[in-house]
Image (tube, helix red, strand yellow):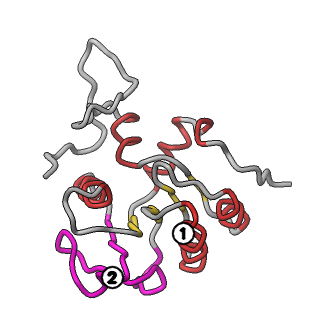
Amino acid sequence: MTDTRITEPADYTDAFLRGVLDNAKSIAVVGASADPVKASFFVMKYLRDKGYTVIPVNPKMAGQTILGLPVYASLKDLPEPPDMVDVFRNSAAAGGVTDEAIAAGAKVVWMQLGVRNDEAAARAQAAGLTVVMDRCPKMEIQRLYGEIGRIGVNSNVLVTRRMAPTKSFKKLI
């Protein structure tokens, strides 16, 4: 029998998060913004610069571009299923986005910092998706791969020797 209990965000192991991030190649960012001071913009830019294929999703901006990428109105409009859906919507709206991610054939639903919807997570897990809640993929990449964050994110890694980079590091904005 499969364990369908929701994993508490504090209980995600580093190996689990690394596996999610290493296996995702395409990430649909739901709630993407063209405003460079919004978190969804700089997270999307960061992920793109790390080599992920990012797909902006925002119904108000459909047909426009963000970072030179076409914006889609919803997940159902994507030409192919994304590996991961990064949810930049509130906890209540995350339920509908999760249902769209299931229907679209995504493998992972990742709810941003402060976003948690246990009912949606249970539906996604029952459909075979991996779920991460209340975490930021940008911050997790920085923490897990020893990158010192530009905004003072504590990487929980303190070493006296230089660590070999495991991903490319490009200057943001």
Q: Residue at x 50, y 49 (%)?
A: 114
Q: Is residue 148 above or below residue 96?
A: above
Q: Residues within 10 Å of mark 2 (few under 14, many from 20)?
A: few
- Residue 148, disc: none
Q: Where residue 70 appears, x then y in whole percent? A: 25, 80
Looking at the rendering, the stretch of residues picked out in magenta corresponds to 53-81
Marks 2 and 1 sit apart, C-alpha to C-alpha, by 15 Å
Q: Which residue is mark 2?
A: 60
Q: Residue at x 53, y 37 (%)?
A: 15
Q: On the rendered structure, is 2 left or right of 98?
A: right
Q: Is residue 15 above or below residue 110?
A: above
Task: Say whether marks 2 and 1 touch (CB < 8 Å).
Answer: no
Q: Which residue is mark 1?
A: 93
Q: Residue at x 46, y 79 (%)?
A: 75
Q: On the rendered structure, is 173 left or right of 135?
A: left
Residue placed furthest toward the top = 160
Of residue 9 and residue 161, the one placed in the foreground of this image is: 9
Residue 122 on the magenta segment: no
Image quadrant in which the N terminus is located: bottom right
- Residue type at tag 2: Lys
Q: Quadrant of residue 35?
A: bottom left
- Residue type at tag 1: Ala
Q: Residue at x 21, y 37 (%)?
A: 150
Q: Where residue 84 appears, x then y in whole percent? A: 47, 63
